């Protein structure tokens, strides 16, 4: 009987282990008709929680429970909006730089960024990522363990060297991905626990 109880407990143990994720997707575009010049979307456990674009110029909650964050932090959505507006301008510059690197003057082009982290609510293990893409292909990505940028394309090597030499930015990125991001995961999961816990995957 004891081995059966042990296996049963082991099974319950596995079911309760959930990995939560926080991801942000930024998309800047040039020459794309009927599409905002810039869009940013926040996702917690693959559920959209926020959106901002260059047309509305506001970062807004996409889940009812996300509205309650302003109860604890009244400036939260205003600060998120300001961050969105700054990112929009940065992405406009990035697209122009990329077009120059690839010797492009016309056509539709898209510059993207995806960053975030995953947090295991049982083991506490954290994985972080930060990667950029241009016109549907990888451009440059952050190697968290090696604390350096990886450039799979020749046109991104200049960016890699520039960012690798900015040690303050490297340190900030590492701290955000391993410390700040997981803390936000926990906050968001706590706010939306009733709906998010239904989407957690079994490991």
Image (tube, rainbow, N blue to C red):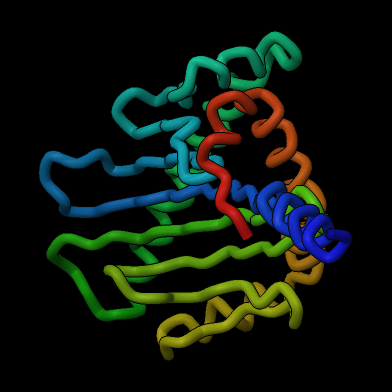
Horizontal side, residue 202 vs residue 166: left or right:
left
The residue that appears at 35% across and 79% down in the rendered structure is 101
Indicate the position of residue 70 as horizontal and vertical percent values: 66, 13
Horizontal side, residue 55 vs residue 173: left or right:
left
Indicate the position of residue 42 as horizontal and vertical percent values: 50, 40
Question: Is residue 101 among what the camera can see?
Answer: yes
Front position in the image: 62 or 95: 62
- For residue 200, what is the image quadrant? top right
Front position in the image: 2 or 93: 2
Looking at the rendered structure, the number of numbered marks drawn on it comes to: 0
The residue that appears at 36% across and 41% down in the rendered structure is 39
Q: Residue furthest right?
A: 2
Rendered view: 64 above or below 83: above
| Quadrant that contains the C terminus | bottom right
Indicate the position of residue 139 as horizontal and vertical percent values: 43, 75
Indicate the position of residue 52 as horizontal and vertical percent values: 41, 31
Rendered view: 71 above or below 91: above
Rendered view: 126 above or below 147: above
The residue that appears at 19% across and 41% down in the rendered structure is 35
| Quadrant that contains the N terminus | bottom right
- For residue 58, what is the image quadrant? top left
């Amino acid at each position: 009987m004891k081995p059966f109880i042990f296996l049963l407990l082991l099974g319950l143990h596995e079911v309760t282990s959930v990995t939560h994720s926080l991801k942000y997707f930024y998309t800047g575009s040039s020459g794309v008709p009927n599409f905002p010049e810039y869009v940013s979307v926040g996702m917690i456990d693959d559920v959209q929680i926020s959106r901002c674009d260059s047309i509305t110029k506001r970062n807004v909650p996409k889940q009812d429970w996300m509205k309650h964050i302003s109860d604890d932090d009244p400036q939260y959505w205003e600060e998120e909006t300001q961050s969105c507006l700054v990112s929009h301008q940065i992405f406009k510059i990035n697209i122009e730089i990329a077009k120059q690197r690839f010797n492009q003057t016309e056509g539709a082009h898209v510059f993207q960024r995806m960053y975030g982290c995953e947090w295991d609510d049982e083991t506490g293990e954290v994985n972080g990522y930060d990667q950029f893409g241009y016109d549907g292909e990888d451009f440059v990505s952050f190697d968290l363990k090696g604390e350096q940028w990886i450039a799979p394309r020749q046109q991104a090597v200049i960016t890699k060297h520039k960012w690798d030499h900015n040690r303050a930015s490297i340190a900030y990125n590492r701290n955000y991905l391993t410390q700040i991001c997981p803390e936000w995961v926990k906050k968001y999961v706590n706010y939306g626990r009733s709906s998010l816990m239904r989407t957690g995957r079994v490991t």
